[in-house]
Image (tube, grey):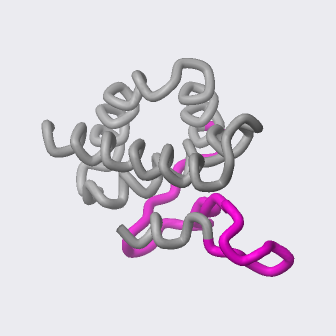
Amino acid sequence: MALLAVVGLGGTGTPAGAFECPAPHPKASVGAFKEPEPEIVAYSNLLAAQGTGVVSEIVAELKKTHPGAHNADITNFLVTLYCPVVNRDGDLGDDQKRQKIMTFAADVSKELHRR
C-alpha cells in the first residue's frame, strides 16, 4: 500500500525515520477522493472518541457516498484520518505508532473485503 510507505519517512525539518502522518489530498484524484472538511473532522473525531470499533460504520458510509471508490482508496483515507489520533498518543514511540497504523490498515482492509 503506497500510503503506508509514506508514513514514517522524514520530511523537511524532520529527522529521517521520524513518524509522520500523511496529509489528506486537496482534491479528488486517481487513488484518492476528497471528503468535505466537516466530514473529515467528524470521522477523525469518531475514531478518536470510539476507537477502531467504528470502522465498519465509517466504511459503510464511505461505500454509500463513494460507490466507485477502490478498497485501497478507502483504506488510505481512513489511515490518513486515524494517523493523527495515534500520533497524539505520547505513550507510544515512533515504531509503536507505525505498527499501530499498519495493524489498523490491515483491519480496515479485512473489513472492506468482507463487504
Q: Is residue 62 left or right of residue 10?
A: left
**At which x and y percent is residue 32?**
43, 65
Q: In front: 41, or 18?
A: 18
Identify the image quadrant of residue 76.
Answer: bottom left
Residue 107 drawn above or below residue 56: below
Q: In front: 6, or 64?
A: 6
Tell me the chief SS of the magenta region: loop
Residue 47 drawn above or below residue 99: above
Q: Is residue 82 magenta-colored?
A: no
Identify the image quadrant of residue 38.
Answer: top right
**At which x and y percent is residue 90?**
76, 38
The structure residue drawn at horizontal position 48% and vertical position 50%, both measured from the top left corner, is 99
Total marks placed: 0
Q: Is residue 4 left or right of residue 40?
A: left
**At which x and y percent is residue 97?**
59, 48
Indicate the quadrant containing the C terminus: top left, top right, bottom left or bottom right: top left
Residue lying furthest top: 50
Residue lying furthest left: 114
Residue 18 drawn above or below residue 89: below
The structure residue drawn at horizontal position 51% and vertical position 57%, both measured from the top left corner, is 34
Indicate the quadrant containing the N terminus: top left, top right, bottom left or bottom right: bottom left
The magenta stretch is 9-38
Residue 42 drawn above or below residue 108: above
Q: Is residue 115 left or right of residue 59?
A: left
Q: Is residue 29 magenta-colored?
A: yes
Residue lying furthest right: 13
**At which x and y percent is residue 63?**
28, 42
The structure residue drawn at horizontal position 26% and vertical position 59%, both measured from the top left corner, is 70
